[in-house]
Amino acid sequence: MRKVRLPDGTMVPALGQGTWHMGEKRGAAKQEADALRLGIDLGMTLIDTAEMYGNGGAEEVVATAIINRRDDVFIVSKVYPHNASREGTPAACERSLKRLRVDCIDLYLLHWRGSYPLAETVEAFEKLKAQGKIRHWGVSNLDAGDMQELLKAPHGVNCATDQVLYHPGSRGIEFALLPWCRQHRIPIMAYSPIGHSGQILRSTALATVAKRHNATPAQIAIAWGLRHADVISIPKAADLEHVRENAAAASIMLTKEDLATIDATHKPPVRSQPLDIL
Ligand SMILES: NC(=O)c1ccc[n+]([C@@H]2O[C@H](COP(=O)([O-])OP(=O)(O)OC[C@H]3O[C@@H](n4cnc5c(N)ncnc54)[C@H](OP(=O)(O)O)[C@@H]3O)[C@@H](O)[C@H]2O)c1
């Protein structure tokens, strides 16, 4: 599996696994943990979760999936903005650690910007880092202006990633945010890389490119995000066949012709636009 470099030099897999909507139904938990385990076997060892998903249920599914495999995985979780205060952040982190059944979260993100000052959340993250409860911290759903503010906060430069919506049907970040993050050596983590709801998978452009590679539109959407050396992609799949497909997408190399085919339908941004959020 190709790796992406975090700002401090830590290498993480370019392709990981999402968990939104996991842990919502008790009866589905085994299948979901099996899917994550298969994904780990296939090299997708970065797992993205959040206290929000399934009300903590997704973190419990992750805990089951990584039994006896803690050292093989890189766990990403997120704090709700309404918990991201000086006192609320460590309390939320403790709850997540307990549900995940681990001593340390590899990367802890602010899920989106709320009412607490970014500097206060960063202070809490840095404290958790010093205590060994988290290894890195980052943010999610922050646009370029927020990122500039973040980097001006004390220790703000330690931000390891910005996790944002990015797929062929939502590529506004290419205008300002992606170049800005690249300039500051902060990798982007692309969420909903296959469009979340399946609509993008009906794109004729993706179907045309998929045919050329004997692949599926979902695989092309993932490969498209991974064409950047500094983008991490975290598709979610509870279906084992989807997991296998997604893992195989990491080895699809899109050609200039493929990218032009996709650009013709899913046009790159020509002006700044507000960050798309799911
Ligand atoms: N930070 C944020 O605000 C934020 C927001 C959204 C998402 N995220 C993170 O990003 C992850 C991924 O995003 P997402 O879950 O929104 O959407 P996604 O990964 O783009 O799409 C997930 C959907 O696609 C299906 N799928 C997976 N692989 C497929 C394949 N090869 N062919 C066809 N369908 C396939 C899944 O079905 P099955 O499950 O049935 O396999 C599921 O219904 C989330 O799970 C979460 O961890 C973060």
Image (cartoon, helix red, strand yellow):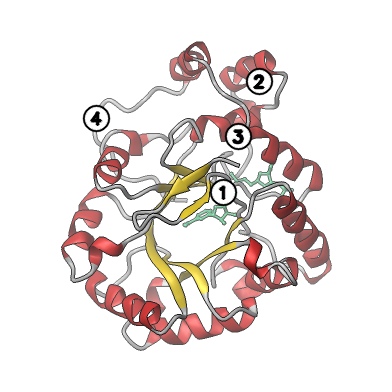
- The amino acid on which the numbered mark 3 sits, given as a three-letter code, is Gln
Instruction: Tell me the tag on residue 234.
Output: 1
Q: How crowded is mark 1: few (under 14 residues within 10 Å), some or many (20 or more)?
A: many
**CB at mark 1 closer than 8 A to ligand 1?**
yes
Of the pair 188 and 277, the residue shown nearer to us: 188
Q: Mark 4 points at which residue?
A: 271
Q: Nearer the viewer, residue 76 or 26?
A: 76
Image vertical order of residue 174 relative to residue 111, above or below: above
Quadrant where the image shows the N terminus: top right
Judge depth for marks 2 and 4 and give the one in front.
Answer: 2
The residue wearing badge 3 is 199
Label whose residue precedes the other's in the sequence (3 or 1): 3
Q: Residue 35 carries which label?
A: none
Total numbered labels: 4
Q: Tell which circle, 3 or 2, labels the residue nearer the N-terminal end.
A: 3
Give the quadrant of residue 112. Answer: bottom left
